[in-house]
Image (tube, coloured by chain):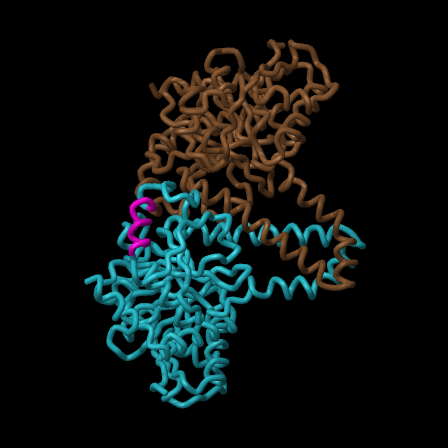
Chain colours: A cyan, B brown
Amino acid sequence: MRDRVRIVVDAMGGDHAPAEIIGGCVAALRESDRISLILTGRAEVIRRHLGNESFGEDRLQIIDARDVIETGEPPVAAIRRKKDSSIVIGMKLIRDGQADAFISAGSTGAVLVGGQLLVGRLPGVARAPLAPLLPTKKGFSLLIDCGANVDARPEHLVQFAKMGSLYMEQMLNIKQPKVGIVNVGVEEEKGNALVKETFPLLKACPDIRFAGSIEAREIPSGEVDVIVCEAFVGNVILKLFEGVALTMLGIVKKAIKSGVLSKIGGLLLKKPLKKELKQYVDNDQGGAPMLGLRGLVIKAHGNSQAKDIRNAIMQCQRFHETGLVEKMKEVMKEDI
Amino acid sequence: MRDRVRIVVDAMGGDHAPAEIIGGCVAALRESDRISLILTGRAEVIRRHLGNESFGEDRLQIIDARDVIETGEPPVAAIRRKKDSSIVIGMKLIRDGQADAFISAGSTGAVLVGGQLLVGRLPGVARAPLAPLLPTKKGFSLLIDCGANVDARPEHLVQFAKMGSLYMEQMLNIKQPKVGIVNVGVEEEKGNALVKETFPLLKACPDIRFAGSIEAREIPSGEVDVIVCEAFVGNVILKLFEGVALTMLGIVKKAIKSGVLSKIGGLLLKKPLKKELKQYVDNDQGGAPMLGLRGLVIKAHGNSQAKDIRNAIMQCQRFHETGLVEKMKEVMKEDI
């Protein structure tokens, strides 16, 4: 076994910070002996929420950070100015080799900018994509990229395909993950300029198993494991997926509430429906990884609960123990 | 009252052609005296399906077309080569002033190419967008463009906004429709190069009521009436919307079927759920209009039933009676 994986958790980020964030840390520390955590944020607030919990200095450390980056702040300016924030301090710990991974449920923009500027990309990596897992009928597909760097070039998408494949193989145990590129049709001549240029590059790439184009309609079926697209399109997919799913659930709830009989119907359906929806609601990974960096950065959902933070910590543990940063370094250095 | 609106219907296009197509035509002819229809396709097949129905030569005409364009065919080649197809013959009738509108549930590609090449754009219109209505919590939003011409320029998107606003105002009686542009955030500095360039143009356009950016998550809420995007993104939105909605319905069905009690629950919920879903299943317009052409072209869904074709015919009647082609001509000639 390797040494304990050292994970920094931003105690101040997210809708339910710091209570749920710290709750997730405590749960993870109890569960796994292979992690040590560093909580960044206002020390006195963190201590108050920890209460009587005690894990020893080698398992749990608190690093005081007085600033808080708000969700609405322009991220580049925030990262530059708020040097005493939980995000900046936390990410610098990775840069300086004092930690392996960083988790935040705070400002997505600040996490993405901080990942690039503070943690830094691996040699050969042109862009560090944000790659959330989408729930599908078959399990999960990695949607890469949903980050802040829109207007990608073909060579960026090829790198996304390589990094995404490695992630799915190592983290979700999928042998030779299937890669698809988001397109407006499955025929090879279809697509916009970016897709048309990228298609032959993906086809020729020996490091991936390219399955061709995928139409957005097919995404929920889970036919491919890695869904490649540039960040503008990825962002639209991620958010529409959520928007439509919540709308449909709202419709079912409204129907249930519409009368006495339908309420009884709803009660009878509750358990099996919950079971079927479980996969769509639970995010085992706890957050989206930002790939191609010198350490792991996880962007947890803004409304993360303790169990999500716990899951994100476990994702970091697995990421570290599979040696994914080193493996990615190995694969990506061909691109230097 | 104007003269009867002359609508060409492609009898051979669609999964349920010709039976459902002809069924829809018969229903519309019975219902409205203000339309006359021209059915294009194999005359003997059409006659067989019409059976004893008779409306007189001035209400229903059949024009023989021997070729059929299949869905998989490359559309440009198909339109050029299959001159004796129901689509080519039907569209030429509009070009030659012998008809006002054209409906097909056949190959989307062929309809889009035919619209541009055979029917032709109005003066000043650079691109003719395909603009389906998306069901929302508040009614419908027009998603413009979902057509075949990807990689649009900013001035194209501004034209889409103008044409879409006119459509929603005239066809759905929405006073001063709100226009939003699909973006990755609501802040003005967000977006890809296309959106950043288009944003100030939309803001400055006096013909529309611009409401700023809309994130994909908000699309189902129906906050804006006209959703502007380039066709690649529009295609992803349209197809993912459908894919996620069907997946969610599949989950509910699976939960209902999982046991005896849940089946009873499903029975109790059936009616209210159907009522809530009605708006999402019924497409009152029967198909997506292709705007900016010298006549109206409607692309009906491939799996159109008789009621959808009937609805598409009624859309054509309304389109004609509001004088929308002339109004659009008036608005768009400023762009010449």
Residue A64 image point, x, y percent: 34, 77
Question: Going 49% across and 84% down the picture, which residue do you hit?
Answer: A31
**Majority secondary structure of the magenta segment?**
helix
Left or right side of A209 for B11: right
Q: State the residue at coordinates (34%, 32%).
A: B201
Residue B126 placement, left or right of A221: left
Residue A282 occupies which quadrant of the picture? Answer: bottom right
B307 sits to left or right of A335: right
Residue A118 visible in the displayed image: no
Is residue A200 shown in magenta? Answer: yes
- Rendered view: B83 above or below B223: above
Membership of A265 in magenta stretch: no
Residue A278: give x, y in percent of width and height. 59, 65
Examine the image and state in which quarter residue B147 appears.
Answer: top left
Give the residue displayed 66% in from the left and 29% down from the top: B19
Quarter of the C terminus of chain A within the rendering: bottom left
Residues in magenta, as a range: A195-204
The count of marks equals 0
